[in-house]
Image (cartoon, rainbow, N blue to C red):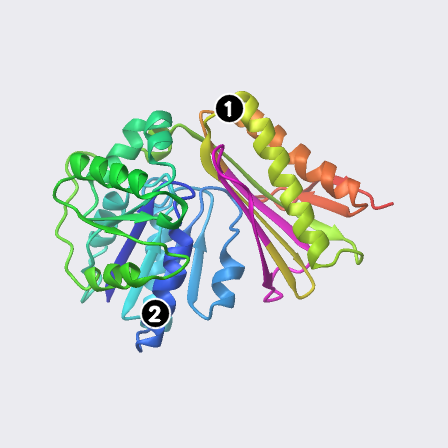
Amino acid sequence: MKVIIIGGFLGSGKTTTLLSLGRHMVEKGHRVAIIVNEIGEVGVDGETLAGSGLIARELTSGCICCTLKISMEYTLQTLEEEYDPDVLIIEPTGIALPLQIKEHVALMELPELSFAPVVTIVDASRLNVELSQVPKFIVTQIKEAEILCVNKIDLVDRETLVSVTGKLMDLNPDALIVEFSARRADAQFMRFIDLLAGEGTARQEGENRNSIELSQVSSHSGKYSLDTKDLDREDMAAMILKILEEVKEKIELLNPLFIGHVKISLSLGKDLVKGSLTSSQGYPMVELLESSGQDPNQLKFLSAVTLLSKPDLVHIIDSAIRSNLERKHVGYESADPVTGLINIKGTSK
């Protein structure tokens, strides 16, 4: 089984890269399985992955290079026994260290295991801000990579792209660097896929590190069960966009240069809307998809932001979601993601 580990900071485009890569490999006849790790207690991307036809498992409530090593080992062994993939793609949370994950998987001593070169994805539009917000963590991710992917090149001009690539070469002159747009799956993305055919040789030096502490990121996640029949796809998209705009405005008051990832998934019947915000410099993005039906009438969210206290993040996210649900007269129940106990209700009018 070939293991591909795709790392990169929050919002760099790992999931989009993973989906494009997984679909391509399935088309080529490979049996592909995916392990996705979210830092919060709630996974947001599971329905998207399920709808893609790929075999996927989500690990939540921590980081697989720190607190979820046992869960990852169990999940990996179960996938191998039940599905027997020839390719396993691991997408760790954006505040994980991919090389540390490789070491943990290697110690499992699974038979006939090989590794592709360790990958770190860099958002071409955010590298300078990332280096200013969490320099030690970003530099560590870059220096430990064997392949550095400069993603979202469609969002920057040529001068910016040359500057970003130059900084990566200075930080890690030994890495292979490839520039692409994962969303477009362009010709350079195909070159990236070819590079994964190689064998990874990087080894971790020194003791294990707590990547959550190193990243200086606060996180908050949760889900709401909804009671409404009045929202159509356009209403859903407009509400998600409004929530993210309010979140962005409030976070900027406390950290004007924040980076991270705020993800919201809203499923009503057959309709699925996903929203995403990755930095103060970017704009909220919304996708209209078709629901697999596994999370009916539910809003789920996951947020992780730099240099912001946990209480502030919780207040900003929860108040934005609840005020917009109430504005649309949507009834809701919020359950603790760990215990399942109802902790707040909102009544439709």
| Residue at image point 59% right, 43% down | 222
Q: Is residue 195 above or below residue 344?
A: below
User: Few, some or many C-alpha atoms within 10 Å of disc 2 (few <14, some 14-19, many ≥20)?
Assistant: some
> In the image, residue 171 lies at what x, y percent?
18, 35
Q: Quadrant of residue 165?
A: top left
Report crowding for label 1: few under 14, some 14 to 19, many 20 or more residues within 10 A (C-alpha): some
- CA distance for labels 2 and 1: 40 Å
Look at discs 2 and 1 and give the one toward the viewer: 2
Location of mark 2 (residue): 24
Q: Disc 1 marks which amino acid? A: Ser
Q: Which residues are magenta?
A: 274-303
Residue located farthest toward the bottom when viewing the structure as drawn? 29
Q: Earlier in the sequence, mark 2 or mark 1?
A: 2
User: Can residue 311 be seen here?
Assistant: no
Labelled disc at residue 186: none
As helix, strand or loop, the secondary structure at mark 2 comes to helix
Is residue 282 a member of the stretch shown in magenta? yes
Q: Residue at x 47, y 34 (%)?
A: 281
Where is mark 1, residue-wise? Answer: 309
